[in-house]
Image: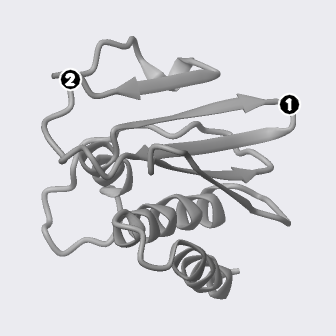
């Protein structure tokens, strides 16, 4: 299944071509897809892409679900560790992100807008790990 992460990155990069959000979209897709492969017991992981008229890019990764939901975990103290930074990266780079979870599985999505520059995220949500639907929007 790990080879499919590379396939998903190549597919998205090819589809987005020279779009200004391509590199960020490929990076964030890689993070979400990798999480789906590692944490969900899915036989299939699906990717959907929506490019808006305004140039925004929305990518959704859907899996068959797991026992946990995506969460903003504490950043590992070891700078060389390869795990635990995915959602932090998604929060820092995307303008919006979130997930939905139901009996069919979990879908994690993010939106990039070529007109926005990454900035500090302000969260006004209660604990995400108890919610079936979660959305985070940058303010300011």
Looking at the image, residue 28 lies above or below residue 13: above
Give the residue pinned by disc 1: 103
What percent of the width, then of the height, locates residue 80? 18, 75
Q: Which mark sits nearer the N-terminus, 2 or 1?
A: 1
The residue most toward the front is 53
Specify the label residue 34 is tagged with.
Answer: none
On the image, which quarter does residue 22 sit in?
bottom left
Quadrant for the C terminus in the image: top left
Looking at the image, residue 1 lies above or below residue 48: below
Give the CA separation, mark 2 to mark 1: 30 Å
Quadrant for the N terminus in the image: bottom right
Left or right relative to 82: residue 47: right
Left or right relative to 43: residue 70: left
What residue do we see at 68% from left, 40% from top?
67
Give the residue pinned by disc 2: 122
Looking at the image, residue 89 lies above or below residue 4: above
């Amino acid at each position: 299944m790990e080879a499919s992460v590379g396939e998903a990155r190549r597919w998205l990069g090819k589809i987005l071509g020279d779009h200004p959000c391509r590199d960020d979209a490929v990076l964030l897709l890689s993070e979400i897809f990798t999480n789906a492969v590692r944490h969900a017991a899915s036989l299939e992981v699906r990717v959907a892409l929506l490019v808006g008229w305004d140039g925004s890019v929305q990518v959704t990764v859907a899996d068959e679900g797991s026992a946990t939901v995506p969460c903003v975990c504490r950043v590992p103290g070891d700078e060389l560790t390869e795990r635990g930074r995915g959602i932090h990266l998604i929060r820092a780079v995307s303008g919006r992100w979130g997930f939905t979870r139901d009996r069919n599985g979990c879908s994690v999505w993010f939106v990039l807008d070529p007109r926005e520059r990454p900035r500090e995220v302000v969260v006004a949500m209660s604990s995400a790990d108890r919610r079936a639907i979660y959305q985070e929007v940058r303010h300011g």
